[in-house]
Image: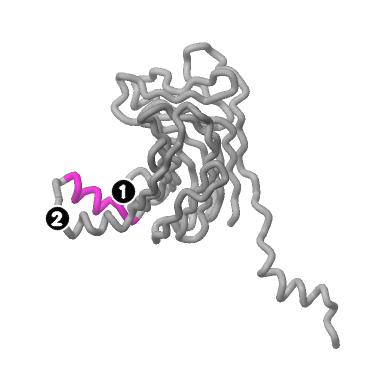
C-alpha cells in the first residue's frame, strides 16, 4: 500500500524543519514603581538588592528603561533575576553602557548543586569586549571554586580555566543604544551585537539541559530595555 506524500514528508522532512521558537518573556519596562524610591521592578523580576545592598534601590524604572546602578553599600554586583526554562534558547535585549560599564547575561540552574549558585554560562559585554564563559565546568564548579578560594595558583588550574572562556574585541560607542542577541544551542553560545556576529564559543557546560533562570549581572551602571526570551528546545 502506498503511503500518502504528506506522510513521507512528515517522516523524512520533519527533521529538516526547525520548530518555531516559543516566546517565554517580553518586557519593555513601560511602567513605574508603586512607591517612588523603592525598588519594585515588576513583571516577575527580582534582584539581590535586599540582601546584597541592605535593601537600597539599585534598579529604577525611568521613562520605560531599566536603569541599574550598584549601590555604594552593596557587597556584590547587582543581579536581576527572571525565571525561564529551556535547554536551547535565545535572549535579546537593548543596552546602553557608559565608559567602563558592563552588563552580563547569566544562565542559571539553582537546582544544580555541583556549581556555586547554579551558574552555568554567561555572556558579558563592555564597550571594548565580549566575553563568553562556561561557568559550570569552569570557575563556578564547586571543587574548582574551593581550590581558587584556598589560593591554588597552579599552572594546571590556570590552563583549565583558560579553556572555559573566550574573549572578543568590540568597539562600541559609549552612551549609544545597542542590541544584544544571544543564542544557546547545544554546547555553543553565539552572540550578535547590532545584528553583526560578535563571538561564538563552545564548551560542555553550555549544553546543560535546563536553564531555569536568566540573570542580568551589572558591576557598574547599565541601562536595559526590550528584553525578550525564546525557547528553542
Mark nearest the camera among 1 and 2 is: 2
Q: How many marks?
A: 2
> Does residue 63 appear left or right of residue 210 in this picture?
right
Q: Would you call the spot at circle 1 few (<14 residues within 10 Å), some (14-19), or many (20 or more)?
A: many
**Secondary structure category for the residue under label 1:** loop
Q: CA distance from mark 1 to mark 2?
A: 17 Å
Measuring from the top left, give residue 200's x and y in whole percent: 45, 55
Disc 2 is placed on an element classified as: loop
Question: Label 2: which residue?
Answer: 154
Query: In the figure, is residue 93 to the left or right of 6?
Result: left
Inspect the magenta stretch and tell me whether residue 145 lies in it.
yes
In this view, the residue in front, 165 or 129, is 129
| Magenta-drawn stretch, dominant element (helix, strand or loop) | helix
Instruction: Name which of mark 1 and mark 2 comes first in the sequence.
Output: 1
Q: Which residue is mark 1?
A: 140
| Neighbourhood count class around disc 2 (C-alpha, 10 Å): few under 14, some 14–19, many 20 upward | few
Q: Which residues are magenta?
A: 137-149
Q: Nearer the viewer, residue 212 or 94?
A: 94
Amino acid at each position: 500500500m502506498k503511503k500518502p506524500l504528506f506522510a513521507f514528508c512528515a517522516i523524512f522532512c520533519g527533521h529538516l524543519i526547525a520548530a518555531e521558537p516559543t516566546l517565554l518573556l517580553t518586557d519593555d519596562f513601560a511602567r513605574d514603581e508603586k512607591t517612588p524610591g523603592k525598588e519594585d521592578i515588576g513583571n516577575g523580576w527580582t534582584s539581590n538588592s535586599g540582601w546584597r545592598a541592605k535593601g537600597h534601590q539599585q534598579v529604577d524604572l525611568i521613562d520605560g528603561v531599566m536603569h541599574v546602578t550598584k549601590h555604594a553599600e552593596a557587597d556584590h554586583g547587582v543581579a536581576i533575576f527572571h525565571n525561564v526554562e529551556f535547554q536551547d534558547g535565545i535572549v535579546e535585549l537593548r543596552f546602553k553602557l557608559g565608559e567602563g560599564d558592563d552588563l552580563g547575561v547569566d544562565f542559571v540552574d539553582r537546582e544544580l548543586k555541583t556549581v556555586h549558585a547554579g551558574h552555568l554560562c554567561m555572556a558579558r559585554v563592555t564597550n571594548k569586549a565580549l566575553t563568553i564563559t562556561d561557568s559550570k565546568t569552569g570557575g563556578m564548579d564547586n571543587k574548582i571554586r574551593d581550590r581558587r578560594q584556598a589560593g591554588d595558583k597552579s599552572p594546571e588550574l590556570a590552563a583549565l580555566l583558560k579553556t572555559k572562556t573566550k574573549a572578543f574585541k568590540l568597539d562600541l560607542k559609549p552612551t549609544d543604544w545597542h542590541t544584544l542577541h544571544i543564542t544557546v544551542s547545544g554546547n555553543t553560545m553565539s552572540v550578535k551585537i547590532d545584528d553583526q556576529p560578535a563571538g561564538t564559543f563552545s564548551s560542555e557546560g553550555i549544553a546543560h539541559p535546563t536553564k531555569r533562570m536568566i540573570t542580568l549581572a551589572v558591576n557598574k551602571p547599565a541601562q536595559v530595555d526590550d528584553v525578550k526570551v525564546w525557547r528553542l528546545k
